[in-house]
Amino acid sequence: MAMTTYTVKRGDSLWWIASNYGSSIAGNSINAKIDTLVQLNGIKNRNLIYVGQVLKLSGSGSGSSSSGSSGSSSSTAQTQPVVNAFGLQAANTTTGKNRAMYAAWTFSRGNTKNFKYRWFQYKNGKWVIGNEGTTTGADPVYCYSEWIADTAATKVQFQVAPIPTTHKDSNNNDVDDWTGAQWSVTKEYDFSNNPPLTPPTPSVSITDLTLTVSISNIVASELDAVSVKFNIVKDNSASIHTSSPVKINQTSNYVSYQYTVQPGSKYTVRACSVNSKGKESGWSDFSGEAETKPSAPSQITTYRRNKRSDGSVSAYLEWTAVANATKYKIEYTTVREDFETASNNIQSVETENARTSIEVTGIETGYDYFFRVKAVNSIGESDPTDIVVIPIGTPPAAPTTWSSASSAFVGESMSLNWTHNPTDNSRQSYAQLSLKVNDNDWVSFVFENTTNETSGETIDESTFTYGKAVSYKGQLHVELNTSYSTLKNAKIQWKVRTAGVTDQFSDTAWSVERTIYIYEMPTLNLSMTSDLAGTGDIITTLTSFPFYIRGVVSLESYGIQKPIGYHLRIVSNGQYQTVDDTGRTVTVNPGDAVYSKYFDTTSVLVVEMSANNVDLESGINYTVYCTADMSNGLTVDQSHDFSVSWTDVTYMINAEISVDTDAYTALITPYCYDSNGELIENLTLSVYRREYDGRYTQISSGIPNNSTSITDPHPALDYARYRLVAKDTTTGAISFYDMAGYPVGGTAVIIQWDEEWSTFDVMDETSVEGPSWSGSMLKLPYNIDVTDKRATEVSFVEYAGRKHPVSYYGTQVGETSSWNMSIPKEDKETIYALRRLSLWSGDVYVREPSGMGYWANVNVSFSQKHTEVTVPVTLDITRVEGGV
């Protein structure tokens, strides 16, 4: 039978060896197994074994003592014991006993009484006797010695010598039975070779997959160790890791070690001590089991949207089981990034036990829900599974549609737009566009919405047969390629349906069918010539009036569309100042239209331009813009640039003025001479009265430059002031002259109403053709008390937080006056005129000697008393808008 042995380690005992290796040792009990070990190895003291001793665990052996016996004729000459067992006691591990030594020897000579022994110890640099004595008998049981050296000792030595028995000689003296006894060979042991003691059983804990093993109250000097190694065993079956020696903190008497373990298992740990020479102790007992949090389920195997019997929508999930999970936690959110940021928006629900499926209810529709699952036990939660997405919602309603226009020319833009109308508040995921071109079949195209409301300025485009689909900020629309050959002069019908979070189109939720038209692009030919027929050269520099603008629309499909009108504009390309028909200075800026008119015609456009309908400035560049309106509602544009270069003409403008002091009217005869004193041809004149408040009132315009006179029925009563305006009918140039005031000399207030007047020609110096004026006039040459009142249109609005109201001014100016006077009773004509005025239901023109005059509404009030010689009169006057 093969022999099995065991080498004794420090801290071992026969009881421990029999307990741990009992399967190799004969015996029905621990004590029987110990008896087997004693018999096989000739152990004389079952409590004493030494470190390094090799023990037989099975096989044959002798019961004779290994320490010697008392008599063998073959060994009668032996004088020196043989030390065959020497070393550190294995089982003696109590505090301070790491110096406990053991020695055993053999000696086979008869007539041996006992033995003397001596122990030496090396300390403080020299050998000294630490212990000496004799054994109590020669029986082999007592052929051993044990001793504990001082803690300061670094080495020990041992010697033993036999002591023979004695007999009485003839003189009755004790005589040794034999002589020549010798000390055994000296045995020496160095305590630095002490194997360390086995450390206490470690403590183990696991936090977030970090295993921490530690031993507290561990005294390095008592273990003859400087460090500890730890052996980690997984699920009581496999050793997965043995650490390198971990140094003992001799200040805190503490040692610890950490190791990252895998989830879903249980772990135990044992320890052994390691001394400075690298010698290791035996392993301690295993620690208690430490369990980790569970491992993550490998995957979510089933997930789907589930419609419940009550009409609500839920999410159903199944996943793989985890062995050490006691329950599962399902987390979900509508924003995938929430899982990365640990957002508070994450919702969760747990199973009641280790069931591996769940129906999540009470969730809002209209979103993509992102789910993940964690396994849970008493230690903690596992990592999550991969994320799955379940759309929760219902198909949307029909979208709202519109196009950028109902028709377009080939090459122009045409957008088909729609608004997603969800029934579950979800955003648009897909759209399906269906088109029908002329009488062809319907064709459909599906587009994906690849942006959302937070995508900034990102624009995604995808092309299809008739154009491209555009995704922008969560919306989709289609831009047709109107240049596509089959779309020319085409009728296009279109409709759309959309999908929401479920990515499903409703079978019935199509939008209304809309119709658009794509027409041939017509050509507008625009020309500017000096002849009516339009056959002359195109004008690029205009030197004289008139000129003609011609617009002709050219296209192939006159049966489908035709022009119905033209809008003509002439726009300045530079900035300049000119004079308008009233003589006021006007600033023309680039882009201002100096001519604009619409012509309602279906034929060719031909417009004569002269000084009568446009005013152009020499040295300025202009652009003619023409827009043709087509019968299909579309327009086509064309433009032409030209510059102006006139020949300057010098004017001398003046007028003759006379005043009728009875009617207080003025006769004005304007004229305009050249530098030679001749009346200028191709010139018209206008006369404007300058009012007291700086305004100009047109008296007459278009007066030929042939000494034609005009009447001003209401000149100011102090001075008559006029502006004369001359317009060249050839170039449109305008000049003006402000005349000096002509004295009128009126001293009474004059009120006129129910008037008629006309212009007439002065044929010679004595004859006047035509009437001057007719109407009613009231002169009031009396002292008049005047009270004027003016008020601008203003409203005051109070706002919270402001100390004062805010004023808003309008366009109206209220101007009233109250005139009071006394008229002698004898002035019957004036009183009669006042009565007629009080009955007048129209406006009147009032003037007073200071030069003020305007149209007004007058209320007359006066009373006559028989005791008074005067009649007090009050005129309440309110200024109104009027003419000349």
Image (tube, helix red, strand yellow):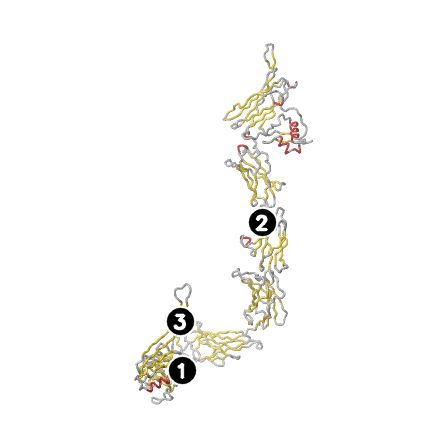
- Residue type, mark 1 in image: Gly
Q: From the image, tell me which residue sits under label 3.
A: 794
Residue at disc 3, secondary structure: strand
- Residue type, mark 2 in image: Asp
Q: Earlier in the sequence, mark 3 or mark 2?
A: 2
- The span from disc 3 to disc 1 (Cα, nearest Å) is 28 Å
Percent from the top left, x then y, of residue 112? 61, 18
Pick whichever, 604 or 303, lies toward us.
303
Percent from the top left, x then y, of residue 128? 52, 23
Quadrant of image for the N terminus: top right
- Compared with 457, 103 (above or below) is above
Which residue: 62% across, 60% down? 311
Labels 1 and 2 touching (C-beta < 8 A): no
Q: Earlier in the sequence, mark 1 or mark 2?
A: 2
- Examine the image and state in which quarter residue 336 appears: bottom right
Q: Residue furthest right?
A: 1
Residue 842, which numbered label? Answer: 1
Answer yes or no: is residue 744 visible.
no
- Residue type, mark 3 in image: Val
Quadrant of image for the C terminus: bottom left
Residue at disc 1, secondary structure: loop
Q: From the image, tell me which residue sits under label 2.
A: 383
The residue carrying pointer 1 sits among few (fewer than 14), some (14 to 19) or many (20 or more) residues within 10 Å by Cα, namely few
In-image side of 238 versus 782 (left or right): right
- Compared with 173, 53 (above or below) is below
- The span from disc 3 to disc 2 (Cα, nearest Å) is 74 Å
